[in-house]
Amino acid sequence: MAEIVYGFGSSHGPLLSTAPEKWDLRAQADMENPAHPFRGEFYNYEELKELRKDENLGAQNQLSVREGRHARNQKHMDALAEKVAEVDPDIIVVVGDDQHEWFQDDIQPTFTVFHGDEVINTALDQEKVKTMQPGLAISMRANHPDVDHAYPVPSALSRAIIEQAIEDEFDIATSSEHPTNEKGLIGVGHAVGFIYRRILHDKPVPVVPILLNTFFPPNQPTPRRCYKFGQSIGRAIQGWNGDKKVAICASGGISHFVIDEDFDNRMLKAMIERDEDAIFNEPNVMFRSGTSETKNWITVAGILSQTSLEMDLLDYVPCYRTEAGTGNAMAFATWT
């Protein structure tokens, strides 16, 4: 039978791949955003800055602080890459989110399991990069190779996950082929591409991509639903008759693009302690914008809740880029 031998979580936010002195490139967009979600409400930049003035976040936005936190991020991603190579799993199940990459507003599944024979991480689209907002083009290079790379998918495990999900009354979507557009095949999204590039260093480890709609209303899953879906995935893996070592990956998070350290620490503590009530009772309105990617971690926590593996938080690194508290809080963890 298959065995879950390891779990890990890594943020994949743009600031991880951006030099600290260039974090300001996204600050102008923050200042022009009329509706920053924060703790269930929406604020423009000036309102957010006034609301958070007592936190003295400007001190955390100094270049020397940024440099230190950037170094911590790189250290932990390097450590995760080394540990994954050491564990040498036969398969990695990657739980991430889709942000109008494979799915658009015409169809946006809540949960999707890919069960084709391979996935493609396509080369960086230079024409697309030219049209991107300042600060995003830099980070795209962390998600895409110079040439297309194909990676195997253990489709038998994918189908076992699908079948178990249906048995557990999850009406999930499935896909066996990449979507296409006028330019051709659309490669895997950033949540999977980042893991291939930064953690696996393009090593062709078989991967099962599982995508959540965490971002786009009205059909985002609740924290409870994500955790329960994770438990279904865990049952499928442990009941699969493939003699394989399986690792589980949470890609994304934690709070962004408004950092909320209280929320992050509350959710990370709940996952470490396997406190299901704390996870289930967190209001869904707290999971908006990039912060919604915390649900990828909650799903993985559900998968691993049925194993003896314990979560170890390697580091939590809030990376501020403005005094209003915008930026990306990073987290890195293992389950061993």
Image: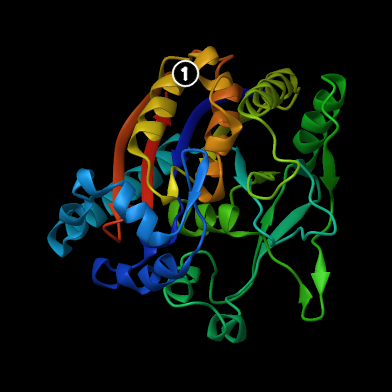
User: Which residue is depicted at the point 15% across and 54% down?
Assistant: 59
Residue 198: x %, y % from top left: 44, 57
Amino acid under disc 1 = Leu
Q: Is residue 261 left or right of residue 134?
A: left
SS at badge 1: loop
Residue 139 relative to residue 171: left or right: left
Indicate the quadrant containing the N terminus: top left, top right, bottom left or bottom right.
Answer: top right
**In this picture, is 46 found above or below 133?**
above
Q: Residues within 10 Å of mark 1 (few under 14, many from 20)?
A: some
Q: Which residue is mark 1?
A: 309
Who is closer to the viewer here, 93 or 271?
A: 271
Residue at the image point whose x is 35% and y is 32% from the top:
262
Which of the 4 image quadrants contains residue 315? top left
Snapshot quadrant of residue 298: top right
Q: Residue at x 59, y 48 (%)?
A: 205
- Across and down, in percent, residue 327 comes to 36, 56
Q: Between 318 and 301, which is closer to the camera in this rendering? A: 318
Rendered residue at 59%/53% (across/down): 192
